[in-house]
Amino acid sequence: MNAEQIQIVLVMIIYFAVLVYLGIYYSKRAHASSDFYFIGGRTLGPWITAMSAEASDMSGWLLMGLPGLAYWCGLSDAFWTSVGLAAGTYINWLFVAGRLRKYSAQAGNSITIPEFISNRFKEDKKIILAIASIFILVFFTVYAASCFVTFGKLFSTLFGLDYQPIMIAGAIIVIFYTLFGGFLAESVSDFIQGIIMIIALCAVTAIGINTAGGIGAILDNVKSIPGFFEFFGIARPQLADGIQQLDAIGNPLFGPAGKYGLLTVISTLSWGLGYFGMPQVLLRFMAIKEASELKKSRRIATIWCIISLFAAVAIGLIGRTLYPAELLTESSAENIFIIMSTGLLPSLLAGVVLTGILAATMSSSDSYLLIASSALARDIYKGIIRKEATDKQVLLLSRTVLLIISIIGIIIALDENSVIFKVVAFAWAGFGATFGPIMLFSLFWQRTTREAAIAGMLTGGCMVFIWNYLIKPLGGVFGIYELLPAFVLSCIVIVITSLLTKKPDKAILEEFEQVRSS
């Protein structure tokens, strides 16, 4: 390991030490009760609520997946994805946050998403609770795996280390401070990580523009690639066995530009729909101390999101100008942020910037592991199997489940050729289609019934698998992002089922009116 690598490692070690300290510091409060462990006792302030929500949402794909997408095939896919995410962020904070904060407290003081949906419909047989918890376990295990892949790619690219051992080591660090610190440690660390992420993105973008000779030079370069700098076209690298080919003098080869039609744009914009069903974001709405502080949180979160997404896409375009033939596979393209950081910045500053990837990854993986473990321990075990279970028993089981989920995530992440963006896209669609429609209807349509909630969740969650693995491969109009058809179909099923089933009981309707009028 050379002197530059040692400096980068020292910065990261300091960062890890801070995270371990947070886990230990908050462990006493986390152990006070399951309410504190899973939702922080609803004590978050507006800044931590906003920054932790966005940092836990964006994860390592913001610094690796999104820039890699822009580097590989150009502006369109990354741009429309970012527009959808930015719009979804704002709308979710504007309409869902306040209503959910009030309703979750009113509906049996719910502290998890499955518990809220179940309490919203006052079900005796906890079918909604079970279905929601199972989907959370499945999709968050996939999500956690994507974070572990990011760890492995980061350290194997930086230091030439073997991917699998270093990926496992990174996963163990996340497991430690999530295991002991709970939601409060996770939220405070996410706040710190959100700050590091946006500084890292802006710093690399600014220095990259300067090194490339200015915005004009970058635009001249990317416009010379067919379909690369188009809103309704897409670049197509010429591949052989998955590797981009080079011409006689070492320049990357591209085929004719592909079409990026209106249906594809709508499909990509549908990423924004996912926000309505993201448990790690929705939990922050529920955990803020006062609903009146959400307006401030919304402004902070939206500004952070727009700046970060813009910078991430720009890094991909700048990277194609500075390092045109450096990364020749779709998977390796996701390392462009690392290549630019180490190539353009002094070692200590590069260490700080690259810590942004760790920040992004940890801020998400801790949320995923905590929510997934709570789904089984609190929602299924205490909610269905053993209702008289004590807080101590729930916390013990939660930690056990967290370890099991982590091991499964590590096994999934063993493939170093995984494309982070694709793994995240599937899990995002799963949550968006499973929980997004029913959350919206539960919060804003009084007539929604328990039967509709069950049918809607099953339809959305299952359709993500069906569309992705059976219908999408047909191509053509069926090649759209699975979130869009699954979300729409779930909404249709909820409306039809609600109208065909018995009107909700008086107690449910009265509670809905109390929340709406408060």
Image: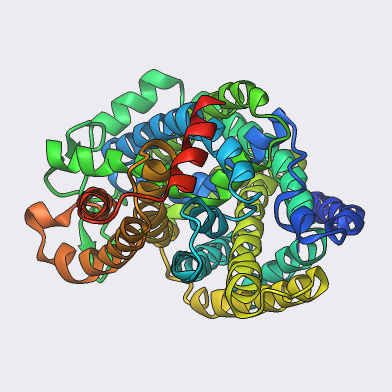
Q: Quadrant of the C terminus?
A: top right
Please say which color scheme the image uses.
rainbow
Instruction: Tell me where residue 10 appears, x and y as whole percent.
Output: 83, 53
Residue occupying the point 51% across, 70% down: 137
Nearest the camera: 413 or 138? 138
Residue occupying the point 50% across, 50% down: 120
The count of marks equals 0
Nearest the camera: 514 or 100? 514
Which quadrant would residue 242 be assigned to in this image?
A: bottom left
Q: Is residue 268 above or below residue 427?
A: above
Q: Quadrant of the N terminus?
A: bottom right
Q: Is residue 423 above or below residue 254?
A: below
Which quadrant would residue 463 be assigned to in this image?
A: bottom left
User: Is residue 343 visible in the rendered structure shown here?
Assistant: no
Which quadrant would residue 372 be assigned to in this image?
A: bottom right
32 left or right, relative to 207? right
User: Is residue 264 visible in the rendered structure shown here?
Assistant: yes
357 left or right, relative to 208? right
Instruction: Tell me where residue 320 appears, x and y as whole percent.
Output: 38, 41
Instruction: Tell me where residue 237 appears, x and y as whole percent.
Output: 23, 52
| Residue occupying the far front of the picture | 506
Q: Is residue 75 above or below residue 142?
A: above
| Residue occupying the far left of the picture | 476
Instruction: Tell me where residue 250 appears, x and y as whole percent.
Output: 32, 52
Residue occupying the point 49% across, 77% down: 412
29 left or right, relative to 273? right
